[in-house]
Amino acid sequence: MTTDAAQTQLRNFTISTEIFFKPNLDIYSQMTYIVLSSHTSDTASLSLSEVAKKGRMTTKQAIKAMQELVDEQLIPHKLFRKMIGEFQDDRLSWAAKGLLTYCKQHRNITIDELLMLSDQSGEDEHSIRKALSELARNGYLEEYPELRRLAN
């Protein structure tokens, strides 16, 4: 490799050292943060498999690492959702995933309508509110203001 070629492949970036002092972050979370930070301008085009490959981890480890980074508020939840999708998010129960899928198809649904539908599914009000709380806690109700308000 010539010197000119090596210089064109160099990429300088700066990351905060705070990730090294967060006790909840393991080495995979730290490496994922470094990989994402090194792609700040084009993170949106980065795939989960590329993050895993560059971070020298499995896809499952990359998902868990990204979940920890979201929980620590080191990366935005929207980035996580775009790269992972809700069905690979281990923090969500199947009830919450199903409710989210239904809410996506019925964007203007109200809590009263959900409770009326619960009679058809065998779920009670407590189960629905629990799933809503789970979705709110993990950042999935951002585009559903009425449901987010009721989940708190």
Image: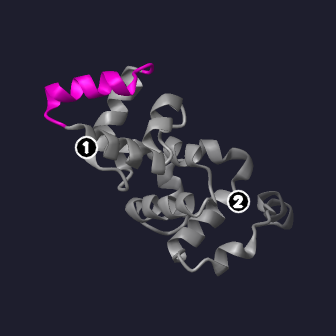
Task: Pinpoint residue 12: horizontal percent, then vertical percent.
Answer: 81, 63
Q: Is residue 107 above or below residue 38?
A: above
As shown in the figure, which amino acid type bears the numbered disc 1? Ser
Q: Which residues are magenta?
A: 107-123
Tally of numbered tags: 2
- Visible residue check, residue 52: no
Q: Main secondary structure of the magenta part?
A: helix
Instruction: Using the image as rendered, state which of residue 134 and residue 76 is in the foreground.
Output: 134
What residue is shown with label 1? 127
Judge left or right: residue 8 versus residue 135: right
* Label 1: few (<14), some (14–19) or many (≥20) C-alpha neighbours in 10 Å: some
What residue is shown with label 2? 38
Judge left or right: residue 123 versus residue 43: left
Task: Pinpoint residue 82: horizontal percent, then vertical percent.
Answer: 52, 41
Q: Which mark is residue 87?
A: none
Tell whether position 3 is magenta: no
Q: Is residue 147 above or below residue 136?
A: above
Instruction: Using the image as rendered, state which of residue 146 and residue 13 is in the foreground.
Output: 146
